[in-house]
Amino acid sequence: MHLVAAKNNSYYFPITFKDSKRSIVFLILGVLLSISGYAQEKESLGTEVVNIVKPYTPTISDAFKIKETPVLSDSITTTKKPVQYSIFSVPVASTFTPAKGKAATVEKAKPIKLYDNYATLGFGNYTSILGELYSNFEISRTDNVGFFFEHNSSQGGVDGVRLEDKFYDTSLDANYTSRQRDASYRLDTGVGHQLFNWYGLDKNFNTLTDEALATIDPRHSYLSGYVGGSMAIDDSYFEKVVANVRFTSDSFGSSEFNISVRPEFTVPVSDFAVKVDVDINYLNGSFDKGYLNTIGIKYGFLNAGVIPSFAYVNNDLTLTLGAAAYIGLDTENSNTDFFIYPCFGVSYRVVDELLTAYGGLEGGLDQNTYYQYKEANPFVSPTLIVAPTSRIYESFGGLKGKLSNSIGYNVRASYGKDENKALFRLNNYYGLQTAAEGYEQGNSFTVVYDDIKTFAVFGELKIAISNTFSLGIDAIYHNYNTKGQLEAWNLPNLKASVFSSFNITKQLYGGVSLFYVGERKDLFVDRQPFSNTIPVEVTLDGYVDANVNLGYRINDSLSVFAKGSNLLSNNYEKWANYKVLGIQGLLGATYKFDW
């Protein structure tokens, strides 16, 4: 048996009692030892009386347990040991010996011989002649002079026509170009001569005799010439300028003088570019007489405009914001007008080159001229009212891009308003006028003006497979809303075209084109005495014009070709009472050379 010390110097006995007598003896000894220990702390000892009432029987409930859970604090077991990996590399001998590479043979393409000059000559039915000559002379490394001559004619032969219907168109142009280190210059000049016949008589003339028709001289001719040029300067606020002076006259004493100048300035500012365009146009002209009267017609205009704009360009976005301000002076009537037009455009590349969205709002002042009218319709009479057209606005938006590397597309819708838009319309019919001019038989066209709102939808698809084959399809639909006129005379609602070029072999090449023009309307006004003077609308049927050309290269210099036009043999009316030639064929050759 042994004693265990507890708190307050007391002791407890971790013993087991086997009988009561021993228990009493041990209990007495324990009490005595306790008294003895306590007496050591007190200087005076007293007597204690111990009464044993019942022998002590220990139980399990008297035992105690440690209430705290021991915490294991062992740094060796909680710290993870770093693990290192290594690869045991053993070199392995190889007996593989690669074969020596051999350079592939590249076929060298024969360089294409380029010539500075060429001549074309062709003959066809209806006694038609086609001639072209282009020549270029290199004066120095920076300067060149070029000449271009063109002739196209036919002796006529339109089915059912009783008047002379031959025509010819001849022009000669020359240019001089100079490309310096910081600037480039170009000068242009040219003359042109055209002959046409007003052969489009109304069906009422079918009852007249040949002797009566012989009193009509339908011939008329145009003579025009121009001098112009352009200059562009690199790394300068003054970007370029384009100027042109043109003179136009005809066989009836008409004359027109037109000057146009367009300088352009660009100033870069931070992320923006400030661009200022200037547009100056001066026009003066006259006609000897009016339609079936002797009163001459004179016209003159001076239009000056400034078009400032801000352009912002980043990787995908191009934004242009500006306006156009014009002052228009009618020199003959001493009238002055001011015009302001919007100038806004935006283009955003949505998916690289696959899809680009664009849109804008534009307007402007367009000066019409006698030269432009006769180029669009050579059967106009020299008795026109010439005036400018004000494009109040044209809003547009569309999508363009590529479906693949060889297929491109463009779709666009627009809506705009024009004031004083020019329309071609038949001159009034007064019956046979034996003492009148050849254009005063109701067989020529005048120009009328109207305010027109136009909605248009345009679509285009182009396919290009290297130099072997290319195909293009486009179509445009117009819806016109006129203000004063009953219709938008001679403007078709629908136009479409299909054109392609192909190379069958290195020597054989060709192309196909189809053109469709929808219905147009004109106005027939009968002013004969005792006739019904109510105007009658004339509907011109739509037409398809099919054309094919084939060529064969005999060598680098010489090639022969064949052309076919209006292959559907449709003697359609391009203008009211003006039928075209039937199937036309042309054979010719082209020779390229150097002087």
Image (cartoon, grey):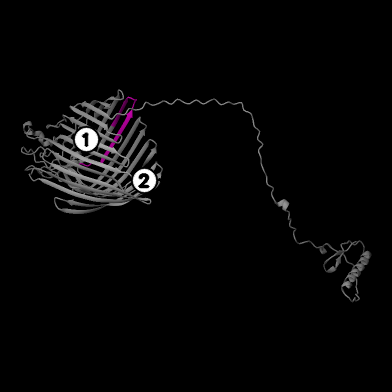
| Quadrant for the C terminus in the image | top left
Q: CA distance from mark 2 to mark 1?
A: 40 Å
Asked if residue 577 is among those painted magenta in the image, a careful observer would answer no
Mark 1 highlights which residue? 173
Question: Front-most of 124 and 369?
Answer: 369
Magenta extent: 490-512
Residue drawn at x 88%, y 63% is: 3
Q: Position of residue 55 (x, y in %)?
A: 90, 67
Residue drawn at x 27%, y 37% is: 177
Q: Position of residue 86 (x, y in %)?
A: 66, 40
Mark 2 highlights which residue? 357
Residue drawn at x 87%, y 74% is: 42
What is the secondary structure assignment of the residue under circle 2? strand
What is the secondary structure assignment of the residue under circle 1? strand
Residue drawn at x 38%, y 39% is: 402
Asked if residue 510 is among those painted magenta in the image, a careful observer would answer yes
Q: How many marks?
A: 2
Q: Position of residue 260 (x, y in %)?
A: 22, 45
Which picture quadrant has residue 371? top left
The three-letter code of the residue at mark 1 reads: Asp
Residue at the farthest top position: 554
